[in-house]
Amino acid sequence: MRPEPLESYTWPPSSESIAERVGIDPRDVIRFDGNVPADPLSVARPATIARALADINEYDRGRYEPLRGAIAARHGRSIDEVTLGAGSDELIVLCARLFAEGGTVATVPATSYSMYRYAAIMAGARLVDDPGAADLVFVCRPNNPTGELPDVPNVSGQLVIDEAYADYAGVDALEWIDRGAIVLRTFSKAFGLAGARVGYALGAAPLIAALSSRQAPLSVSSLSAALALAALASPPDVGPQIAERERLADGLRALGLSPVPSYTNFLYVPMEEPSRLVEDLLPYGVVTRAFRGGWRVSVRDREDDDRLLAALAAVRTGAPEPTRVVRQQRATAETRFRVRLRVPGEGRVHVESGEGFYDHMLQQLAFHGGLDLRVEGVGDPETGDHHTVEDMFRTVGEALDRALGDRRGLARYGEARVPMDEAQAHAVIDLSGRPVAVIDIDPDPGMAAHALESLVQTARVTLHVTAHGRNAHHVAEAAFKAVGRALAAALAPRGTMVNSTKGSL
């Protein structure tokens, strides 16, 4: 007999398909529908998985004992009270098959994470409204999609408390383990490892043994386990995201919306016809989520959330369309960078790569260039600063190239002289579309000339810089300031045409 497909979890469309439908660049799509941080942790880089990758031909013979041991230590439990899963979703499905196959399932609150219903369907179970009458009770705490923190009920059936968002709530229900409950956790949310698919269950040793005996061997990959273990060694500080959640909530209220108080990394707004709002925001590259009776938006960071608020203002109040922000990412075996750039801007700059001196140089260039620039990245300090500095400036150059487009309506040429105590720098720039760098920085503190050359290569500009003095720091700083001020002059508006007798660059 050929089996029929079951009703199952439906993933939202890809960023590429959304971009094609609304006519924007896929890189300009911001996902506010996944309840994940704006960036992964700094440990999520190739060096973290190098050892695991070297042994990728082997199986892990101990079922990832170091990771399970670290999880147990984090929660004050023993290692035999921990089992891993491919995300907590695998464990949700497993619990339904173990405790409610052909039986009944209830959820608390009644409106909760849809995966519980699909797990019940896979187990041939029936959903009931009364938790006290169910064989299996899922408690989503804090709750998805509403963000509330429900009480844990006393029930006769097996209790499974899903704490995917507990890191944001500041409270947990781990004491229920000693009363027979199973607690589920995930590395997808606060730890920023959604793509790694690592979750775990905590429970009394006999319950965990019953769960793990029904799992496929090693459903978590060794690469994912290495990332999770590194993340536990350097856990995230969710304080800034909680503060940003409250700032975003205030911004939503200022636009006439009423978000529910949240214990998570998202906000839920009760409303009629939320699907209409979701559709209206898509042309701005803002992807949110509609539920029956409400609209949900993930909390990202200030820059992304401001983009959301500006798009909402345009949709709800007819405010002017927000200025385009170019988003660029670069990931190599050595580095990972994310750049957000607005041209022209107001000189609002934040650069954080771990290379303090060159972060400072890039800040000077962007500020004096009148750019809004945010750069976040991580490199391989084990091998020095070369890869990190080079890739940071290459990524900014890529973003600048996209922001400039065909260079239409710009002055094109810029020149500036900048003194810095005993040092002096002269910079001349042409937004030519041709990468040419003639750089003379003496003395060079190390990578100042190479940093500018890297920027020129991907920004496709012509740049001549001369900077001399006695103090290497002063010489470099004067050079980067001069480049920024020359860039500001080249970016000045001039007509509507490309400033070239050929009509194009």
Image (cartoon, helix red, strand yellow):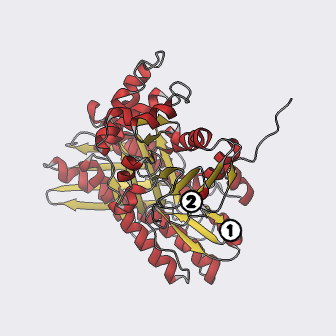
Depth order, front residue of 358/244: 244
Expressed as whole percent of the image width and height from the top left, the position of residue 49 reads: 40, 29
How crowded pointer 1 is (Cα within 10 Å; few <14, some 14-19, many 20+) is rated as few
Q: In this view, does 356 lie to the left or right of 207?
A: left
**Residue 321 makes an appearance in the image:** yes
Amino acid at pointer 2: Gly
Give the residue displayed 71% in from the left and 71% down from the top: 276
* Front tag of 2 and 1: 2
Give the residue displayed 41% in from the left and 72% down from the top: 246
Confirm or deny contact between disc 2 and disc 1 (CB under 8 A).
no
Amino acid at pointer 1: Arg
Give the residue displayed 37% in from the left and 23% down from the top: 51
Expressed as whole percent of the image width and height from the top left, the position of residue 206 reads: 43, 34
Q: In this view, does 469 lie to the left or right of 432?
A: left
**Residue 462 makes an appearance in the image:** no
Q: Is residue 315 above or below residue 347?
A: below
Q: Is residue 488 above or below residue 468?
A: below
Given the current orientation, which residue lies at the most extreme right position? Answer: 1
Q: Is residue 72 left or right of residue 394?
A: left
Which residue is denoted by mark 1 in the rendering? Answer: 292
Q: In which quarter of the image is residue 107?
A: bottom right
Which residue is denoted by mark 2 in the rendering? Answer: 132
Q: Please, what secondary structure does the residue beneath circle 1 have?
A: loop
